[in-house]
Amino acid sequence: MPSNWLSALGLYAWAQADESSDVKSLINPLKKFTYQPPADGIDDTYVVFVIGETTRWDHMGILGYNRDTTPKLAQEKNLVAYRGYSCDTATKLSLRCMFVREGGASDNPQRTLKEQNVFAVLKQLGF
């Protein structure tokens, strides 16, 4: 009597339980953050991501480095800057998981296919 269906059933049950625990830890950014675009259309709001495997937060002037390495960014009003960390050591690998959530796809390769990335969220917020 074939028994491969037992293995498939077990794998399916495990995948469902794993996905359920993933979903419980998610925060919906659309519910937590709001952005109201101006009624008259486009405003001067810009969202800039500084991405690069050679850019380190501890060498950026806007984050306290003693040399002025980011003079143009420092001139921007309403600038929000924070320490960023990459989820991998190569840009190609990092970009896939960088904009999903902490951990990216390292423990679940299907995660990036199932969740919205930051760009989809920004679009839904009106950017």
Image (cartoon, grey):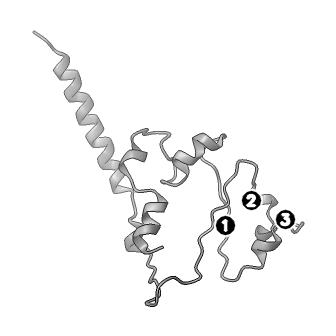
At 70% from the left and 83% from the top, the residue drawn is: 77
Marks 2 and 1: CB-CB under 8 Å?
Answer: yes
Image location (x, y in percent) of residue 23? 33, 53
At 77% from the left and 75% from the top, the residue drawn is: 74
Tell me which amino acid carries mark 1. Answer: Tyr
User: Real-space Cα distance between discs 2 and 1?
Assistant: 8 Å
Q: Identify whether 38 is placed above or below 33.
A: below
Residue extending farthest to the front is 41
User: Real-space Cα distance between discs 1 and 3?
Assistant: 15 Å
Which residue is more in the foreground, 125 or 100? 125
At 19% from the left and 17% from the top, the residue drawn is: 4
Circle 3 residue: 69
User: Real-space Cα distance between discs 3 and 2?
Assistant: 11 Å
Q: In which quarter of the image is residue 62?
A: bottom right
Query: Would you call the spot at circle 1 few (<14 residues within 10 Å), some (14-19), or many (20 or more)?
Result: few
Marks 1 and 3: CB-CB under 8 Å?
Answer: no
At 43% from the left and 78% from the top, the residue drawn is: 34
Q: Identify whether 87 is placed above or below 61.
A: above
Q: Is residue 96 left or right of residue 83?
A: left
Circle 1 residue: 82
Image location (x, y in percent) of residue 102? 52, 52
Tell me which amino acid carries mark 2. Answer: Trp
Q: In this view, does 27 lie to the left or right of 10?
A: right
Which residue is more in the foreground, 127 or 80? 127
Circle 2 residue: 57
Residue extending farthest to the left is 1
Question: Upstream in the sequence, badge 2 or badge 1?
Answer: 2
Image location (x, y in percent) of residue 8? 22, 25
- Judged by depth in the image, the label closer to the viewer, 1 or 3, is 3
